[in-house]
Image (cartoon, helix red, strand yellow):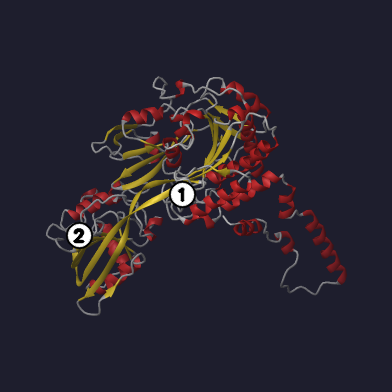
Amino acid sequence: MKPSMHTSFALASCCILAPSALLAQTPLFSDAPAATKAQESAVAADNSSLAQATPHLHSIIQALPLDTQRFNEHIIVLSSPWMGGRLPGTPGMEFAMDYMEYWLKRAGIEPGVPSSDGSPATFRQAFDLGGRRVAKDQSVSITPTAGAAFSLVPNQDVQISGLGKEGSAEGALAFVGYGIEEGPEGYTSFSADHSLEGKIALCFRFEPMNTEGKSLWSGEGWSAQAGFQGKLAAIAKRKPAAIVVINPPGAADPRATSLNTSGGRAIVDVPVFMMSTDAAERVLAAADSKSRSVMELRQEADKGGASFDLAGATASVAASYEEKKTRAENVIGLLKGRGTLASEYIVIGGHLDHLGNGDFGSREGPGRLHPGADDNASGAAGVMIIADDLAQKYAAAPTDANLRSVLFMGFSAEESGLNGSRHYVEHPLYPIKDTVLMMNFDMIGRMTKDRLSVTGANSAKGMLEWAKPIFDRGECTVVINEAMGSGGSDHASFRAAGVPFLFGIIADFHADYHTSRDVSELIERESGMKAVRLWEDLAWEMAQRPERFVFDDQSGPMRGTQIRVRIGMRTRDAEDGSGLEVSDVTKDSISDKAGVLKGDHVVKFNKISIKTREDLVNELRKLEPKGEVQVVITRAGEEKTLFLKLGDE
């Protein structure tokens, strides 16, 4: 990030409004008689005393230690709406990486990514985050039998969906309700004598709703009938030329205002478009002989109205795709060691990315900005501050001191499956065998009573005994987590490669993570800095320690460890290798309460990809009966993130 941008954020972070108590004593309009000079003087004196007693924000900030001021500023900047939730592949994530790179440079940290062609090293380690299909061309036009033809606006009225194939089609319009083959009490969207062959089929998203826009068939959320896979398959087998899915009016779901879908692969072999409610109103005005509104059609479909033609117009649709790869980058800086330890490395990292607008992994669904102040602007801020402080300590150390090299890493794509840290481990820039310790920060900004959970102190022989005195003299209350679970964060990638690790995170989780409520105003600045100073002390001690730790193999697969959590889910390997198929869910179990359904496919558990039942069992062995675990499932062609509540602290 450019210095001018940094300056503007710093100024923005210090703005305040006048205290409401002062405003309350100085009414702008009043029917009371004019105040006497004595009364005015008394009010002025009261206001002056109150103003003196009310601290100004700039005074509060200036009174904080410099490192706490920096922590405050880093979190405000990284969680600003301008960063857009730091989703990999977006401008906001690019801004965040620029910002971290700027502060590493300012601290005197060298670029940590050497080039292969002799060009200067950089701070960026790039990697592919998978491909996505992007519409190259798309068009939808409507030709009424009476009246002028008109076109719909791509990406505003309509948008091609990855749920179908590219291609073109022209035909009559037909309405098929919610596109549901068979629902409760004999519900169906299809008339037995109505043909869809060669037509452009229009259907609603979701499933029949009540007056509040919620499902008629599910007590919470939507049933499996609402998914794309079932309805698109039911329509496609009737051989339409294309399918258009309409966002229904009044639906109590933020996705009803979006043309985006989460489907990553084609479900049917015809083009599939998403259409806004407003565009559907214009289409119906031209095509429906009964002049019904979209809401009136929805209400008919809610009751089970059968399919029929919209004979007043025809449609022409076309779309083509191009494949675009999403590129992500880890930010990596190097503080060179010296002497006999210079060729050994300590990694201090934290993920820089978050969820954008809740595009995936959200606890409240998509559609709102997820600032990610605690998760993980707080951890990334800690990494930058430690980089600055350690650089100063290295510069002040005797020239003949033996010091390990330190790598500072801002990982990308952690939220989508530890992708950045896994890429580094699989493509290390410095030998993994010489990486003696990985220290990971994830969510350190909302500690309760300064309680920091530390996992991994027993990941190497003798490391807990070494770390315990440092824990004891620190300002945090360290809660040592003896379970060797992956913890769903980037240290898991290093642990899998046999690197000793320490993982710091708040000991008491709050309900705001992975929601739009994870904002900078709620960060406990002073408490978070206690964690940062503890991590810095550990890193400085490790930088000088003559001996390296030996990874404890007992912290590996953990096959003999008893499973302490029963989640109430029976699974079997999916035939297509896509994960685990849920064959049964125990009533009132952890999985049942989280919304897992029979027939779901588990693809990730605690951010770890799941291919076999053995994968799931290994992850279950790492859990303790407290906190939550994130589970990603696919249901009817849509990906969903659920949270299993394992128990209380």
Type of amino acid at the residue the image marks with label 2: Ala
Asked whether the residues under the numbered discs 1 and 2 touch, taking CB atoms below 8 Å apart as contact, a structural biologist would say no
Pick out the residue farthest to the left. Answer: 193
Type of amino acid at the residue the image marks with label 1: Leu
Give coordinates of residue 509: x percent, y percent.
53, 38
Instruction: Identify the residue shown where x is 28% and y is 52%.
Output: 228
Q: Nearer the viewer, residue 426 or 180?
A: 426
Quick check: 310 above or below 623? below
Q: CA distance from mark 1 to mark 2?
A: 40 Å
Give coordinates of residue 216: x percent, y percent.
32, 52
Q: Nearer the viewer, residue 42 or 398?
A: 398
Task: Give the crowd class for mark 2: few <14, some 14-19, many >=20 residues within 10 Å.
Answer: some
Task: Give the crowd class for mark 1: few <14, some 14-19, many >=20 residues within 10 Å.
Answer: many
Q: State which mark lies toward you, 1 or 2.
A: 1
Residue picked out by circle 2: 306
Pick out the residue farthest to the right. Answer: 38
Residue 340 sits in which quadrant? top right
Q: Nearer the viewer, residue 152 or 5?
A: 5
Quick check: 27 above or below 418? below
Tell whether 205 sits left or right of 114: left
Give coordinates of residue 173: x percent, y percent.
20, 67
Quick check: 361 above or below 288? above
Element carrying mark 1: loop
Q: Is residue 646 visible?
A: no
Residue picked out by circle 1: 355
Element carrying mark 2: loop
Q: Is residue 36 visible?
A: yes
Quadrant for the N terminus, please: bottom right
